[in-house]
Image (cartoon, rainbow, N blue to C red):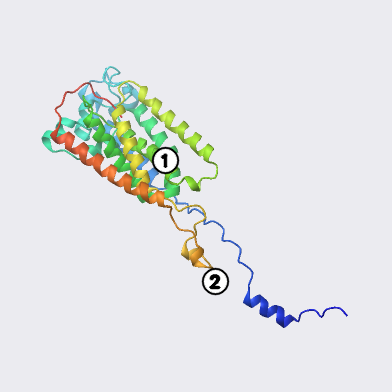
Amino acid sequence: MGKRPPSPDIEKRAYVKNPPPRPPLPPQKQEQWTPWLVPLIFAANVTMFIYTMYDNDCPTYTGTDKCLFYEYLGRYSFQPFKENAVLGPSVITLELLGALDPLRVERNGEAWRFFSCIWLHAGVLHLLTNMISLLFIGIPLEQEFGFLRIGLLYVMSGFGGSLMSALSPEPNISVGASGALFGLLGSMLSELFLNWTTYVNKCKAVTSLLLIIGLNLSFGLIPHVDNSAHIGGFLSGFLLGFILLMRPQYGYVSRRYIPAGYDMIKKKPKHKCYQYLLFIIASVALIFWYLWGLDMFYNGRRFKFPPESLN
């Protein structure tokens, strides 16, 4: 005689006692932010340049016969090429509006120039190159990490670039957002190291980032460009990236996305130990760099000024 098949009641009791394992949760999708701060920074820089040209008023202070494109631009026409080769205002106008002048910062207590100079540009060509870089670098970062972190990174990297510029052996009167932009580049590099496990195509990520950094560093070969601001901004952004751009590791799922009944004990931890370690090291290094730089600026140097530069 054949064996009697198990009754449905027995099968049901066995299923309840030993339920099959639940399928693993899919990786949590990265939330995308709507970028508005980077476009706002773009608009602020362009608006500030237009106001700079309005305040410069080349025809009144230099003469209509010397101003470039006076017939088309009127009050907004540019200074002569021998004075400004990048189609922009005079150095005097830039100083009055907040250019970084280390002598004024030290003797007159005008520390606000460390920040105001990153919103000024020496000319149309200078503004154009910086704003193109801002849109291509800043918008993807804001989409991924949000306006608060990218805004803080932009401003503090700009401060780091200004501080390094003021500490150069022969400091320049300088303007430009390059320090802040190189800070965004530096943060991209540290973010790659910090969140290495989240990248699927690591070779592509490294190659793309090195290409972007190389192209931007090439702008430092242009005459009168302040490379010290680039270095200071890049260093500050590199350290800030470890602090501000930490992402959950691949496979982590937030508690609010876990359905009822899943085992919370087996949930992946949000961050790895090395991410916390890099966060602590970078925080200490960044504080030390800012304090050391400010101490050297106010207590450890005297000034000799070469011709003005842009960063």
Q: Which of 163 and 111 is in front in this view?
A: 163
Secondary element type, mark 2: loop
Q: Position of residue 166 (x, y in %)?
A: 22, 31
Helix, strand or loop status at disc 1: helix
**Residue 109: image x %, image y %?**
13, 38
Q: Residues within 10 Å of mark 2 (few under 14, many from 20)?
A: few
In this orientation, which residue lies closer to the viewer: 67 or 102?
102
Q: Where 78 sits versus 201, above or below? A: above
**Mark 2 and mark 1: span between their CA atoms?**
38 Å
Near mark 1 (Cα within 10 A), the count class, few <14, some 14-19 or many ≥20, is: many
Residue nearest the viewer, comparing 305 with 231: 231
Residue 261: mark in rendering: 2
Task: Name the residue at 86% across, 78% down.
Answer: 2
Q: Where is residue 65 in the image (x, y as percent from the top left)?
A: 27, 17
Residue positioned 13% across, 35% down in the render: 299
**Which badge, 2 or 1, comes first in the chain's sequence?**
1
Q: Position of residue 250 (x, y in %)?
A: 50, 52
Q: Residue furthest front?
A: 1
- From the viewer's perspective, tell me whether residue 202 is left or right of residue 113: right
Can residue 139 be seen in the rendering of this structure? no
Q: Mark 1 points at which residue?
A: 188
